Image (cartoon, rainbow, N blue to C red):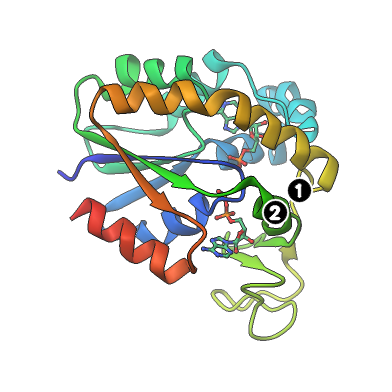
């Protein structure tokens, strides 16, 4: 089995875009943000508990997200791409000890100057039907409001937490938590950095080079 991939990077650095391109090529993409949004959409008890936290752009507590992740993956069946987990060094340790437990893994850090992130995020649109990610500036759909991938009409939505104010909070939290996490993976000799400012195809080529 290929090593599990742990994708690290600020909100808007392109984790979801790259992970969904790689999914299917022997990997399964798992995004804790998507899992939490799905709980909110289904109005479950967990969804009700975390809804306000996501709207503000704060982090859900470590144990809750870890339990959700564990409930949704079977680590011995397939190689995973972890997108959005870990968010801090405590979660990095939990991932290691509670889930990976010695399985082969690589952490890939999508490095990007903070300046471009807000612009990327506020212009992000996601197809509510199939999850395809667009950008109004850099990757608009071929036909306005029609998803290139699944053909759905008027389903390209902006995430509620992709507003300027909430994004600023999410970016601040990322800046406050990223360094200890990078040091954690560096110390294990399992960290690779990729320049995420390059065009999407180039970033993907570089990701493929890292994993083959
Ligand atoms: P993340 O999952 O890290 O929050 P996304 O993959 O959702 O980031 O990407 C955020 C936004 O940036 C989306 O609108 C996406 O289309 C755009 N984007 C992703 N990768 C690139 C890239 N290499 N260059 C320019 N825009 C990109
Ligand atoms: P994302 O889709 O990765 O941008 O995550 C969206 C939101 O979900 C974040 O702003 C957090 O509120 C929450 N979230 C996602 N993953 C985690 C995590 N690993 N730990 C805590 N909160 C998370």
Dividing the image into 4 quarters, which one contains the N terminus? top left
Q: Residues within 10 Å of mark 2 (few under 14, many from 20)?
A: many
| Residue drawn at 32 percent across, 60 percent down | 206
Residue 189 percent across, percent down from the top left: 23, 29
* Residue at the extreme left: 1
* Residues packed near mark 1 inside 10 Å, few (<14), some (14 to 19) or many (20 plus): many
In the rendered view, tell whether residue 77 sits above or below residue 24. Answer: above
**Label 1 residue near ligand 2, CB within 8 Å:** no
Image side of residue 163 versus residue 60, left or right: right
Give the residue displayed 65% in from the left and 24% down from the top: 59
Contact (Cβ within 8 Å) of mark 1 with mark 2: yes
> Which residue is disc 2 drawn over?
121
Spatial distance from mark 1 to mark 2, Cα to Cα? Answer: 6 Å
Task: Tell me where residue 48 sits by quadrant.
Answer: top right
Residue 79: quadrant of the picture: top left
Mark carried by residue 162: 1
Instruction: Using the image as rendered, state which of residue 146 and residue 138 is in the foreground.
Output: 138
Residue 22, numbered label: none
**1 or 2: tag closer to the N-terminus:** 2
Question: Going 50% across and 58% down the picture, which residue do you hit?
Answer: 17
Name above or below for residue 146 compared with residue 204: below
> Is the residue indicated by label 2 positioned so its CB lies within 8 Å of ligand 1?
yes
Q: Is residue 157 left or right of residue 204?
A: right
Residue 130 at x, y = what percent?
A: 57, 63
**Quick check: 118 above or below 201?**
above
Provide the secondary structure element on which disc 2 rests.
Answer: helix
Left or right position of 77 against 127: left
Split into quadrants, the picture shows ligand 1 in the one at bottom right
């Amino acid at each position: 089995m290929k090593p599990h991939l742990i994708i690290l990077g600020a909100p808007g650095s392109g984790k979801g875009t790259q992970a969904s391109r790689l999914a299917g090529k022997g990997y399964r993409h798992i995004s804790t943000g998507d899992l939490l949004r799905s709980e909110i959409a289904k109005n479950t008890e967990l969804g009700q508990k975390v809804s306000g936290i996501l709207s503000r752009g704060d982090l859900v507590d470590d144990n809750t997200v870890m339990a959700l992740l564990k409930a949704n993956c079977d680590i011995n069946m397939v190689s995973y791409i972890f997108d959005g987990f870990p968010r801090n060094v405590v979660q990095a340790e939990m991932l290691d000890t509670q889930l990976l437990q010695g399985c082969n893994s690589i952490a890939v850090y999508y490095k990007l100057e903070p300046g471009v992130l807000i612009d990327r995020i506020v212009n992000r649109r996601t197809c509510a039907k199939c999850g395809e990610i667009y950008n109004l500036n850099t990757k608009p759909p071929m036909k306005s409001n029609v998803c290139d991938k699944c053909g759905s009409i008027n389903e390209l939505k902006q995430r509620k937490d992709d507003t300027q104010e909430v994004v600023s909070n999410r970016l601040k939290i990322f800046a406050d938590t990223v360094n200890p996490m990078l040091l954690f993976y560096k110390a294990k000799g399992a960290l690779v950095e990729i320049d995420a400012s390059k065009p999407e195809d180039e970033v993907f080529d570089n990701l493929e080079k890292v994993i083959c």
